[in-house]
Image: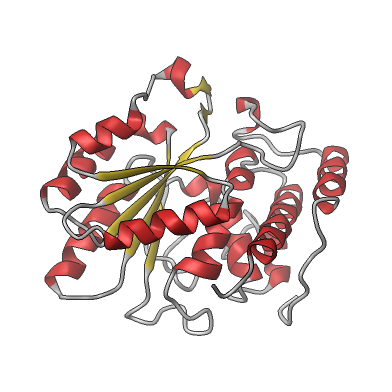
């Protein structure tokens, strides 16, 4: 490991603080999903993915495709913590002319593979990427993050069928199973369970984990790499709004941001969980 579990937990806590700061500066955005996925993003950028933060567009790098682009504050914050973009730039989220828009744009930032936006499209893009990489005999891996709510989209399941048919073992999907979407709880809006059995029925290897357990995240990815005849999905059970008690588990915070007063409460709560790791890019 490059970092201890404790170091990863501290970095993730830093990312959550960065997210709160981004959202308040922007005056708009999404809170619950980004906070819930901080551990997964930190695991990917600091432990799992093969890439160089100083050369983020290296052609042999692992690829990370974010399907549910609205949770981009967590991607931007993690990239800043990794030294890929300046920390100060986080204050420009959603501002006119900023590189940090409300959905990641491929031509604006380093190491961004797709311009995400339409929910349900990311897995199709990732599957095509994985298929082409195999045709070209490339060794890098493709990771795709998607939400549970976008499983309501039919084109997502078309991509599930495609990846299963072509046995895209270089593709690993991580589903943010936080059980909420903009209109309510997923099982009320459009029930998804039994989700893991559905993926297996389409020819996938499927793993169920605690999305806040760094060892579980890394172990699951290790198992995915060992599967040679199937794509792998990791169902990561997360808590929306993780780390901020008044947000945790509440679908109302899907597309809502804290007021300055609420942000102060949130930051004070997060700071009690661990100090920041200072770095040269802060």
Vertical placement of residue 224 versus 199, above or below: below
Vertical placement of residue 271 versus 248, above or below: below
- The percent coordinates of residue 267 (x first, y second) are 83, 48
- The percent coordinates of residue 258 (x first, y second) are 76, 38
Left or right: residue 178 versus residue 278 is left
Residue 101 appears in the rendering: no
Question: Going by the picture, which residue comes out furthest to the top?
Answer: 188
All told, the count of numbered labels is 0
Residue at coordinates 38% horizontally, 82% vertically from top-left? Answer: 58
Residue at coordinates 50% horizontally, 51% vertically from top-left? Answer: 216
Vertical placement of residue 24 versus 281, above or below: above
Please identify the quadrant where the C terminus is shown: bottom right
Residue 151 appears in the rendering: yes
- The percent coordinates of residue 206 (x first, y second) are 31, 43
Residue at coordinates 52% horizontally, 22% vertically from top-left? Answer: 183
Left or right: residue 259 versus residue 87 is right
Taking depth in this image into account, of 240 and 89 the one nearest to the observer is 240
Displayed quadrant of residue 36: top right
Displayed quadrant of residue 204: top left
Task: Give the colouring mode of the picture.
Answer: secondary structure
Residue at coordinates 23% horizontally, 42% vertically from top-left? Answer: 160
Taking depth in this image into account, of 161 and 201 the one nearest to the observer is 201
Please identify the quadrant where the N terminus is shown: bottom right
């Amino acid at each position: 490991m490059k970092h201890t579990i404790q170091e990863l937990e501290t970095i993730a806590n830093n990312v959550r603080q960065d997210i709160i700061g981004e959202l308040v500066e922007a005056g708009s955005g999404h809170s619950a999903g980004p906070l819930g996925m901080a551990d997964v993003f930190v695991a990917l950028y600091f432990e799992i993915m093969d890439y160089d933060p100083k050369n983020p567009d290296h052609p042999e790098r692992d690829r990370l495709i974010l399907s549910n682009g609205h949770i981009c504050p967590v991607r931007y914050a993690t990239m800043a913590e990794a030294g890929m973009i300046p920390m100060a730039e986080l204050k420009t989220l959603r501002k006119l002319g900023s590189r940090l828009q409300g959905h990641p744009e491929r031509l604006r930032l380093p190491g961004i593979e797709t311009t995400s936006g339409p929910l349900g499209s990311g897995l199709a893009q990732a599957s095509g990427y994985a298929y082409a990489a195999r045709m070209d005999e490339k060794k890098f891996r493709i990771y795709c993050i998607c939400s549970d709510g976008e499983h309501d989209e039919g084109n997502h399941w078309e991509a599930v069928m495609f990846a299963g048919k072509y046995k895209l073992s270089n593709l690993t999907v991580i589903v943010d199973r936080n059980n909420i979407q903009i209109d309510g709880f997923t099982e009320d809006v459009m029930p998804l369970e039994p989700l893991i059995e559905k993926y297996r029925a389409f020819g996938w290897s499927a793993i169920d984990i605690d999305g806040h357990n760094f060892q579980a995240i890394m172990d699951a990815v290790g198992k995915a790499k060992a599967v040679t005849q199937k794509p792998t999905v990791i169902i990561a059970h997360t808590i929306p709004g993780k780390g901020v008690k008044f947000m945790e588990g509440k679908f109302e915070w899907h597309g809502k941001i804290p007021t300055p007063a609420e942000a102060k409460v949130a930051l004070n709560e997060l700071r009690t969980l661990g100090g920041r790791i200072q770095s040269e890019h802060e």
